[in-house]
Amino acid sequence: MPRLLKKTRFTAIATSFALVFTLVYPVTGSADSKIRIMTATTDLASLAQEIGGDKVDVESVARGYQDPHFVDPKPSFLLKLSKAELLVVVGLELEIGWLPPLITQSSNPRIQVGAPGYFDASRFARILELPTGQVTRAEGDVHPLGNPHYWLDPDNGLRIAKGIQTKLSEMRPNEAAYFAQRYEAFEQRLKQSDQQWQAQMKPYAGRKVVTYHRSWPNFAEHFGLNVVGYVEPRPGIPPSPQHTVELIAQMKREGVKVIMVEPYFDLKTPNSIARETGAQVVVLMPSVGGEREITDYFKLFDYDIAKLKKAFDETH
Amino acid sequence: MKRFAALPALLLFSAIAHAQDASSVLVKHTATPASAEDARMKVLEDQVRALAGEVALLRSELKELRDTKSPEPASSQQVLLASAHPEPGMLPASPAPAPAQAVQTQTFGGASGNAKLLNPDISLIGDFIGTAGHNNVAPGRSLEMHESEVGLQAIIDPYARADAFISFGETGVNVEEAYVTFTSLPGGLLLKVGKKRADFGKVNTIHNHALPFIDRPLVTNNLVGGEDGIDDSGFFLSRFLPAPKNWFLEGSAEVMRGDSADVFQASRREDVSVVGHLRAYRDLSESTNLDLGVSYARGHNNLGSNFLTNLYSGDATLRWKPLRRAIYNSFLFRTELVWSARDQFSLAVPTRLQTQHAFGMYSSAEYRVNRRWTVGGRFDRSGHATDSRLTDSGFSGILTYWPSEFSQIRGQYRFGHLATSPTDFSNANEFLFQFLFVMGAHGAHPF
């Protein structure tokens, strides 16, 4: 029996699709409700929370112990993004591998690139390692727009917070005074904490360290560390035997005693380098939430500095 | 004139960065040549006067802007900044303080504007395939630059973005996909218009270079149009659907012209094909998730407008990827089932009409052993769309090496038990290898 084309059948299919799509979502977002904020990383979530206080609901896509270059754009994030009023991103192409499809598929006009609800935090931060001259991937997975791990400098944290304050005040002009007051309190606390951090790190100023990935230039600059080498031969390229041998020689020559590693990298190579050189491997957290106890932006530096301090003390 | 163009940029930026007073920067430019000749002096004085007027005007404008707008620095202003350096010949030789100022303040924000301007993201993916061994049913070429896929991707305007993937084979060019996506529609709707791989199952949506195998499963070749699959021009509408807690539901409805490889063919304008897809997704834990889908496709086949092909499919994917070790270890299991019902002339009595029912499926698994190596396998079984008495089966073992994120070397052993008649089979033993390389910024693929 051939099934011949019947107009009615086609209409039935079309109607059923139409029915499915006319289901109406409840209208969200009145002027008094909390601002729903999604951030790419936990650090930005923490900063947004500091400024937004109880006027915002903040959630991060990436977890603190996850490599922010490689995040799966899971559909479960889409639902959250579709309801967000503000999306805060790190920018500088850090999230290029996963955020663009999420933004597009969220079908949320408010957070599309360039829309008022799209907030690129890098625009407010001091960016290091801006490449000069030609950029090619012979240098590995380089970031042509500069190093995107800029949040690890408290000064940048403050700058980003200021930007968030301005943005939130724009979105809820009635609450502008609240956000301004939260920012001032944050600024004061951060400056105070920074003085303590600086004081703790002062004895180790100029210490040479090796890091796994180029995640720490802003941190190193702020706290006076001297990053002299990387476990990765090039950004994003796994360690190679030849590079490891060279690095060991360099560390011995220059007396480097600390290897800083992000929590999402394998410790095998760093450990073997440490064995050869008598250095210590320190797993430092580049983001809030990397460990359970790192619940906010302040605790992030508390944690990292305490660990570094311990490592410096033990290796000398 | 350049200086005047530079002024607003300097002024705006210095205000934003709370830098030193812009006017003083400018005065330093113009006030230095004290020892120059009178004529030059006079010209310069005039310039200073003109500039002072300009500064006053810009200041008032700036004040207005400050009052009305947020102080967020727009990237366009940073672009201007690059041209804000005074040209050497413009003023008598004296070290101008302005460039230093500009360089210092430019470290706020990346080089976002300057690097790309308005070019789309351009990429090329080269896909080289070699085949060795025996296959008497569907012999492939020994060495082949299978495709060079050029990708152009950009945001079109505040309401849309567009993606185009043009694939150059060794002998021809094919618009694999080219579509605009409207991202700002009301009601949570997402509309894509253009030519696109339809949302029929999983493997149909995946580009060649993103597949976890070198070839496509037998079921794709036998029932769903082969390498190109259901890939057609039309409208592609999708929307999230209300779902139980922790579930994600998405529905897609797609209407296309009705020409897709050898599955669908439109003889008249009315012969459009439709695809419907329902996807259900759930996170089982932070590192494990389940992805289910059902799809339906309907179109007219190559026998004419009165002959329909209906395709039904179900797919299931289980993924595991521990977040802390995401770049080292992951596992994926996927299976897809496809049923085809094709109207055609009876094989036994060629004057009678008949619907051929065929079933095909594949199951595949891949495991990332470490950062550079992935092992995988696939089991295939599929009937022929035009002759339900013929059923092919096979299996593959796949090994992939990644020198970096931007290149990939893969080997695949493929065994096929391929039907040549209802009673005869031909065995195929083949070794395939593939080199993939990525140039430029290739956008992320759908999850």
Image (cartoon, rainbow, N blue to C red):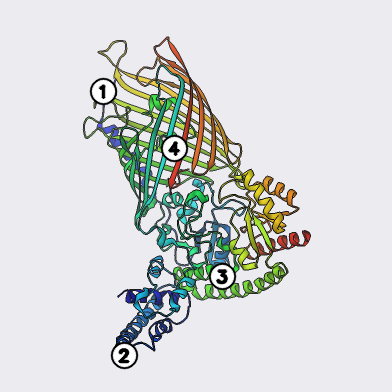
- Residue at the bottom extreme of this rendering: B38
Q: Do marks 1 and 4 both belong to one polypeptide chain? A: yes
The quadrant of the picture occupied by the N terminus of chain B is bottom left
Label 1 CA crowd tier, 10 Å (few <14, some 14–19, many 20+): some
Q: Nearer the viewer, mark 1 or mark 4?
A: 4
* Element on which disc 1 rests: loop
**Residue picked out by circle 1:** B303
Side of A175 relative to A274 (left or right): left
**Residue picked out by circle 2:** B38
The answer, for residue B185, to whether it is visible in the render is no
Figure label count:
4
Q: CA distance from mark 2 to mark 1?
A: 91 Å
Q: Nearer the viewer, mark 1 or mark 3?
A: 3
* Element on which disc 2 rests: helix
Q: Nearer the viewer, mark 2 or mark 4?
A: 2
Q: Do marks 2 and 1 both belong to one polypeptide chain? A: yes
Residue B234 lies, in percent from the top left, at 30, 41
